Amino acid sequence: QKEVEQNSGPLSVPEGAIASLNCTYSDRGSQSFFWYRQYSGKSPELIMFIYSNGDKEDGRFTAQLNKASQYVSLLIRDSQPSDSATYLCAVKEGNFGNEKLTFGTGTRLTIIP
Amino acid sequence: GAGVSQSPRYKVAKRGQDVALRCDPISGHVSLFWYQQALGQGPEFLTYFQNEAQLDKSGLPSDRFFAERPEGSVSTLKIQRTQQEDSAVYLCASTRVGGELFFGEGSRLTVL
């Protein structure tokens, strides 16, 4: 059973601070990693993806990947109340043509004004 | 359409009834996925189509669940003899091969 593990939270962060979300995965063959944001009652929307070890930055968001440790994280700088949502980590296998994503249970983030 | 369209958005069924959930993917998207999301959980994979071919149905929880995409576009997820544990949001997503996964708004099924 391929697993993606996340701390379910809730994680509370003051407005303007850095929110750090973590995810571990069990399948060493995983090649692609995704962070989705899901507002209550809405569908998941893609924030970032990362394929290579290291950091990838996009605006206030930074994804970090460490394949040796099977660990991926998402940092949100200058947190805003609108960032309050559930953040889902998702992993894709390395097999060509296998587009299936395996999701974690999500971390609920609350930004405190 | 501009996005993935799912219907009905809400469905209440009595235990034992059959239900059908429809997904209309983004035009031109080859791949289509169905996920089940229980309250407070992440989406759980059910099944995956590439065009009309069902390439992976390993996530379907029982033989009461059946999905089809006969012309490689619209897909239907059918649940026979619904049980209370089937209550969840059923999410459909579509993508070009290797592209970003776009989700529909989901169909919320409540089985009484």
Image (spheres, grey):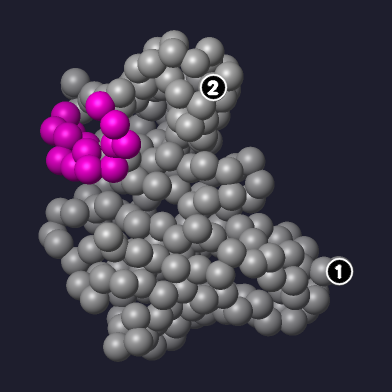
Q: Based on the displayed image, in which of its 4 quarters is residue B35 positioned?
A: top left
Q: Between residues B86 and A21, which one lies in front from this camera angle?
A: B86
Queried whether the magenta region covers residue B59, the answer comes back as yes
- Marker disc for residue B88: none
Q: Is residue B106 in sight in this rendering?
A: no
Query: What chain does badge 1 belong to?
Result: A
Q: Position of residue A91 (x, y in %)?
A: 34, 64
- The residue lying at 32 percent from left, 36 percent from top is B61
What amino acid is found at the position of numbered circle 1 in the picture? Pro
Q: Residue at x 43, y 20 (%)?
A: B82
Q: Amino acid at mark 2?
A: Val
Label 1: element kind? loop
Which residue is at a point 56% across and 24% down the rendered structure image? B110
Residue topped by disc 2: B111
Q: Quadrant of the C terminus of chain A?
A: bottom right
Q: Secondary structure at mark 2?
A: strand
The alpha-carbon separation of the residues under discs 2 and 1 comes to 38 Å
Q: Residue at x 48, y 32 (%)?
A: B85
Residue A36, image x, y percentages: 50, 59
Q: Is residue B49 above or below residue B24?
A: below
Q: Which residues are magenta?
A: B48-63
B32 lies above or below A57 = above
Crowding around mark 2 (Cα neighbors within 10 Å: few <14, some 14 to 19, many 20+) is: some
Q: Residue furthest right?
A: A113
In the displayed structure, does residue B2 sit left or right of residue A32? Answer: right
Q: CB of mark 2 within 8 Å of CB of mark 1? A: no
